[in-house]
Image (cartoon, rainbow, N blue to C red):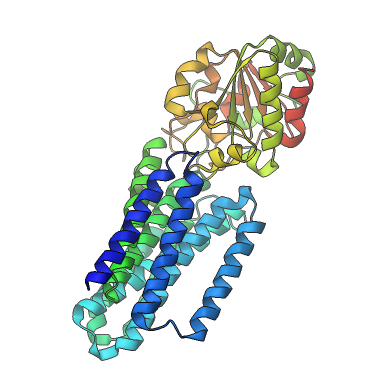
Amino acid sequence: MYLAIIVAAFIITGFLLGIRLMQKPETALWGNRLGALCMLLAILYTLVLLGGWNSIGIWILLAVGLVLGLTLGTIVKMVQIPQMVALLNGFGGAASAGVAVAAAFIDGAGASVFTWLTIGLALAVGIMTLSGSLVAALKLSGLISQQPVVIAGHRYLLYLFLAAGVVMIILSPFLLTNAIYIIFFLFAIYGILLTIRIGGADMPIIISLLNSLSGVAAAICGFAVENMILTGTGAIVGVAGLILTQIMCRAMNRSLPTVLGGFLVKASSCAGEPDAAAVLSSDKDDLADPAERLPQVVRDAQSVIIIPGYGMAVAQAQQQVKDLIDKLEEKGKIVKIAIHPVAGRMPGHMNVLLAEVGIPYEKLYEMDVINQEFESTDLVIAIGACDVINPAANTAEGTPIYGMPILEASGAKQIVVCNMDRKPGYSGVDNTLYLSEKAIGLWGNAADTVPRITALLE
């Protein structure tokens, strides 16, 4: 017992230190490695404690997991990290659900009421996390609609499945293993119904929530199998995920119940402005003729703010952005990079993409800081960013981005937009910034359009 407490304290302390290290870019890699080391120690200690050290099957499974992890870590591109994180959240939930099911069939009728309740709850949260994460990953990959999918009576179906699931958890000490199958089915469907009506614009929030739920499932599972290490580490993940979810909700000026309630995209025409959809679907080749304005605008600008978005990640244009920054600074211009909290489809994704090509972290500015500087900035260059700079967020009521704080790019003296096209972003809301007389559109792949701007500085 005392050994378990000592080992658990050591591992949890290591996790906490790892979290501390990951708060700074310079030490983040070591924080991640420390976390991985603590997890390895937890696995080895559990094998020794439960007598599975000599099991060949366990070592084979560990080897398979190691190979799969190294393979995925090698082949997954940075742009695919959001859906990869969603899958990892799901795997965490699946692992907890698997342990809960194993505990149910091993302990059987001999388990206490408390054990059965924790088994049922761990299974419920774990399988809900798995099914919800799979839907999130499919949405992020574009394999299913990124818009909210709402079916008839959606809210009532959620209530029904949740209520039925809770009843089955309560009855599990009496129904024993028979309850496992029903809980599995009910919460698998519940996770799908809950996540499928979340729109692409809210993916950073739902990913954070699913991350928290994977930790909660592990913590509950720890109670079910009487493993203090599992409970402690799961609780850390759960709390950290909840904090991150709250941060993302604040960044989008949304409440979690509103996000989970789903959103149907409505027309985004704004009072007092022309219909955005009609104007943006016109036959104009560009917002303005870049051949006439762009060279002078780029050369005259002394202060530049670059706004990267998910489109930049899709185009894998990070290196081209780095080249542009270097050329601007070579010409004596002041360059800053504005990062919206939800840019990149998950928290911190954009920061990692830029760090990958050696862009100094000191050049990255958060929204609350940089928004004060747009009005005094000569030029904004938006690269693959749409929803996070859309002024319609202040006016288009009934849309997913209404009320969401944005980067106030429209306040700059000149704006260059390097997006694939003038279509709406993940939210499905037309970007009224494109209508501004100050805006110049360079439509096409950012990997091709950004070098065009760099070439003007030669």
Q: How far across and how far down the image is residue 415, in percent?
A: 63, 20
**Location of residue 236 by image quarter:** bottom left
Task: Please identify the quadrant where the C terminus is shown.
Answer: top right
Q: Is residue 56 left or right of residue 228?
A: right
Residue sitting at the far left = 113
Give above or below for 363 relative to 3.
above
- Position of residue 233 relative to residue 291, above or below, is below
The extreme top residue here reads 300
Q: Residue at x 36, y 63 (%)?
A: 158
Residue 373 percent coordinates (x, y): 49, 16
Q: Is residue 236 above or below residue 66?
A: above
Residue 286 % position (x, y): 73, 24
Judge by depth and name the residue closer to the eye, 197 or 104. Answer: 104
Q: Is residue 220 visible?
A: yes
Of residues 80 and 45, the one nearer the viewer is 45
Q: Nearer the viewer, residue 381 or 110?
A: 110
> Going by the picture, which residue comes out furthest to the bottom?
109
- Percent x, y for residue 454? 75, 23
Left or right of 107 on screen, residue 311: right
Asked if residue 119 lies left or right of residue 322, the reply is left
Corner quadrant of residue 443: top right
* Residue 317 versus residue 374 in the image, above or below: below
Q: Residue at x 50, y 23 (%)?
A: 408
Residue shown at the point (74%, 36%) measured from the top left: 447
Q: Is residue 189 visible?
A: no
